[in-house]
C-alpha cells in the first residue's frame, strides 16, 4: 500500500502482472506507484504473439501510449474482434469495469498510466462540473500531446530513484487532465482565466513546499491547506508565480546550492544532499539545465 507521498518502483520479474502480461516475455517491465496513479512501462523486443486477459474490476481507467511503431493488437469483445495498428504516439484507453481480452502481435513498447475512478470523477467535476464515466477514443488513435508526455514518463520510469513525489503527482495530474478534456464523455468547458492564490495562500504553499528537503510533500495536502482542489491549486500557483510547484522548488534548491557553492568548501556531493537532490549526478544535471553551466564551473567562476 502507498500513501499520497510514497513512491515505489517494482522491477522484479512476475509470471502474470496486474495488466495481464507475461513478465517473462518482457524486455522491460517497470512500475511506479504514487497516490491515485500507477505508472508502467511494458516493452517486448521479440516478434511473437501473446494473449492478455483481465477480468472486470473497480480499479478505474488505464491509458497506454505507444513509444514505437509496428505493434498490432486484436481486441476481442464478446463474439466480435477488431485488429488495431499502433504507430508511435498511438493511444488506447481501458475501463477496468469491462472484461478485457486481446491478442498482442509483434514487438511493442508502451508507457501506461492507471487512474483511480475517484480521481477521474473529481477531475471531471473540477474541469466542467460533470461526472466522467468513460472515454471515447478508438484504439490506435494518434495523440501528439500524449506522445510528448509519454517520453517524459518513460524517462521518469527509467530514473525512478531521482523522481520526486511532487513531480510525479504533477505529471499524473497533467496526463489525467488531458485525458478528461480530450476524451471524456462530457464536453469540457473553457476554464475561467487567471485563478490566483491570495498572499496568505501563496505564503502557506511555499512554506509547505520548502518544509521537507526530500520533496516528499503532497500537492493534495498543500491544496487542502489552501482550501482549494488540487487541480485549481496547480493552476493558481502557476498563474501567481509563473512556475509550477515543482519548478519553483527546483529553483529554490538551486539558489540554496549557489549560496553553498560560493560561501562554503563543501563538496558537490555534500551540497547535493543538503539541497534535496538524490545524488551529485542529479544535482549537476539540474544545476546545468537551470544555470547554464555545471556547478563545478560556476564555483570556479565565483572564485571559491
Image: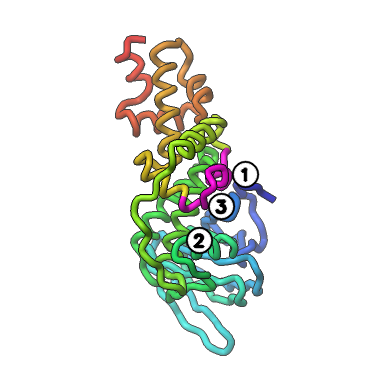
- Image side of residue 63 versus residue 193, left or right: right
Residue at figure coordinates x 64%, y 50% from the top left:
12
Residue at figure coordinates x 51%, y 47% from the top left:
168
Mark found first going from the N terminus, 3 or 1: 1
Q: Secondary structure at mark 3?
A: strand
* Residue 157 visible (yes or no): no
Quadrant containing the C terminus in the rendered view: top left
Give the alpha-carbon distance from disc 2 to disc 1, as whole Å: 21 Å
- The relative height of residue 201 versus residue 133 in the rendered view (above or below) is above
- The relative height of residue 284 versus residue 55 in the rendered view (above or below) is above
* Magenta: main secondary structure: helix
Mark 3 or mark 2, whichever is nearer to me: 2
| Disc on res. 123 | 2
- The relative height of residue 74 versus residue 206 in the rendered view (above or below) is below
Membership of 229 in magenta stretch: yes
Mark found first going from the N terminus, 2 or 1: 1
The residue labelled by disc 1 is 6
The residue labelled by disc 3 is 30
| Disc on res. 272 | none
Position in image of residue 198 (x %, y %)? 44, 41
**How many other residues sit within 10 Å of disc 3, few (<14), some (14-19) or many (≥20)?**
many
**How many other residues sit within 10 Å of disc 1, few (<14), some (14-19) or many (≥20)?**
some
Q: Quadrant of residue 303?
A: top left
Residue at figure coordinates x 45%, y 28% from the top left:
253
Q: How is the image coloured?
A: rainbow
Mark 2 or mark 1, whichever is nearer to me: 2
Give the alpha-carbon distance from disc 3 to disc 1, as whole Å: 16 Å
Taking depth in this image into account, of 64 and 237 the one nearest to the observer is 237
Q: Which residues are magenta?
A: 217-232
- The relative height of residue 275 versus residue 92 in the rendered view (above or below) is above
- Image side of residue 197 versus residue 48, left or right: left
Amino acid at each position: 500500500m502507498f500513501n499520497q507521498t510514497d513512491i515505489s518502483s517494482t522491477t522484479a520479474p512476475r509470471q502474470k502482472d496486474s495488466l495481464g502480461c507475461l513478465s517473462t516475455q518482457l524486455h522491460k517491465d517497470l512500475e511506479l506507484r504514487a497516490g491515485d496513479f500507477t505508472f508502467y512501462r511494458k516493452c517486448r523486443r521479440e516478434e511473437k504473439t501473446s494473449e492478455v486477459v483481465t477480468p472486470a474490476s473497480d480499479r478505474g481507467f488505464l491509458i497506454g501510449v505507444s513509444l514505437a511503431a509496428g505493434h498490432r493488437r486484436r481486441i476481442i469483445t464478446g463474439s466480435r474482434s477488431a485488429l488495431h495498428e499502433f504507430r508511435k504516439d498511438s493511444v488506447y484507453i481501458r475501463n477496468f469495469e469491462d472484461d478485457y481480452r486481446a491478442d498482442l502481435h509483434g514487438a511493442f513498447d508502451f508507457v501506461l498510466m492507471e487512474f483511480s475512478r475517484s480521481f477521474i470523477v473529481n477531475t471531471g467535476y473540477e474541469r466542467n462540473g460533470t461526472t466522467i464515466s468513460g472515454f471515447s477514443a478508438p484504439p490506435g488513435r494518434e495523440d501528439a500531446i500524449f506522445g510528448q508526455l509519454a517520453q517524459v514518463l518513460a524517462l521518469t520510469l527509467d530514473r525512478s530513484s531521482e523522481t520526486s513525489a511532487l513531480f510525479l503527482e504533477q505529471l499524473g495530474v497533467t496526463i489525467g487532465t488531458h485525458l478528461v478534456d480530450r476524451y471524456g464523455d462530457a464536453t469540457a468547458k473553457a476554464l475561467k482565466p487567471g485563478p490566483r492564490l491570495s498572499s496568505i495562500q501563496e505564503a502557506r504553499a511555499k512554506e509547505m513546499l520548502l518544509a521537507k528537503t526530500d520533496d516528499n510533500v503532497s500537492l493534495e495536502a498543500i491544496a487542502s491547506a489552501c482550501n482549494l482542489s488540487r487541480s485549481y491549486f496547480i493552476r493558481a500557483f502557476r498563474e501567481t508565480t509563473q512556475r509550477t510547484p515543482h519548478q519553483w522548488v527546483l529553483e529554490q534548491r538551486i539558489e540554496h546550492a549557489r549560496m553553498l557553492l560560493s560561501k562554503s568548501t563543501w563538496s558537490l556531493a555534500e551540497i547535493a544532499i543538503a539541497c534535496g537532490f538524490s545524488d551529485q549526478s542529479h544535482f549537476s544535471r539540474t544545476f546545468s539545465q537551470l544555470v547554464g553551466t555545471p556547478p563545478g564551473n560556476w564555483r570556479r567562476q565565483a572564485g571559491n
